Amino acid sequence: MFRFRDRRRLGPPLPEPSRAVNLEADPELIREAHLFALDRLGRAMGLAFHPQPCLEPPTHERVVVFGRFDPRAGQREFGLEIGVESGRDVRVAWLIDLYIPERRPNQGFGTRLMKDLVELWVQIGVAEARLTATAEGLPAYESWGFTADESRERRDVGLQPVSLKLG
């Protein structure tokens, strides 16, 4: 019988990737490296990170990572897609969801997460990271080096497309 995992428990840590992650890394290894980084950061902050399954296996064209931090983090989600941008033949990371745990504001959670992600993205050849920031989150993204992305139109009031050039 299927049971939902207790999100309050930290449980055993996710295993460290078995091989080094680099430009030529297998897509599944890239996904594992992201999950490991998220799990390690969550544990450092006293939070559990629970990966969510993806509908499709990772490929060289698309790696998707979804997950949740435990209830103490307000059940906020994390989402990321790394894909090859058509016409440019470069990897782009799209940060879909990033919510700083509500009990963890101004404690370095987001800064450490972005530092770890950017380090990983450079290793796997991501040329640019993109996201759409809320007005509340925009100052944090700007402090991490993101700038307004004029190549994308604003679709919603209060949301700002931003990007970070890497490498």
Image (cartoon, helix red, strand yellow):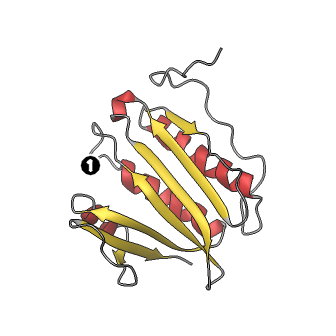
* Residue reaching furthest to the top: 1
Instruction: Tell me the crowding category of disc 1: few under 14, some 14 to 19, or many 20 or more residues within 10 angstroms, Cα based.
Output: few
Quick one: quadrant of the N terminus? top right
The residue shown at (60%, 54%) is 64
Compared with 85, 113 (above or below) is above
Q: Quadrant of the C terminus?
A: bottom right
| Residue displayed at 37% across by 40% down | 76
Q: Is residue 45 left or right of residue 18?
A: left
Compared with 40, 63 (above or below) is below
Residue 105: x, y in percent? 27, 45
Instruction: Give the residue pinned by disc 1.
Output: 106
Q: Is residue 128 above or below residue 20?
A: below
Counting every numbered tag in the picture gives 1
Please tell me whether mark 1 sits on a helix, a strand or a loop.
Answer: loop
Residue nearest the viewer, comparing 59 with 140: 59
Q: Quadrant of residue 134?
A: bottom left
**Residue 101 image-quadrant placement:** top left
Above/below status of 34 relative to 141: above
The residue positioned 22% from the left and 58% from the top of the image is 136
Q: Amino acid at mark 1?
A: Asn
User: Residue 78 location in percent, x, y?
Assistant: 45, 47
Q: Is residue 38 left or right of residue 76?
A: right
In the image, is 105 to the left or to the right of 151?
left
Residue 150, image x, y percentages: 35, 84
In this view, the residue in front, 72 or 58, is: 58
Q: Nearer the viewer, residue 61 or 145?
A: 61
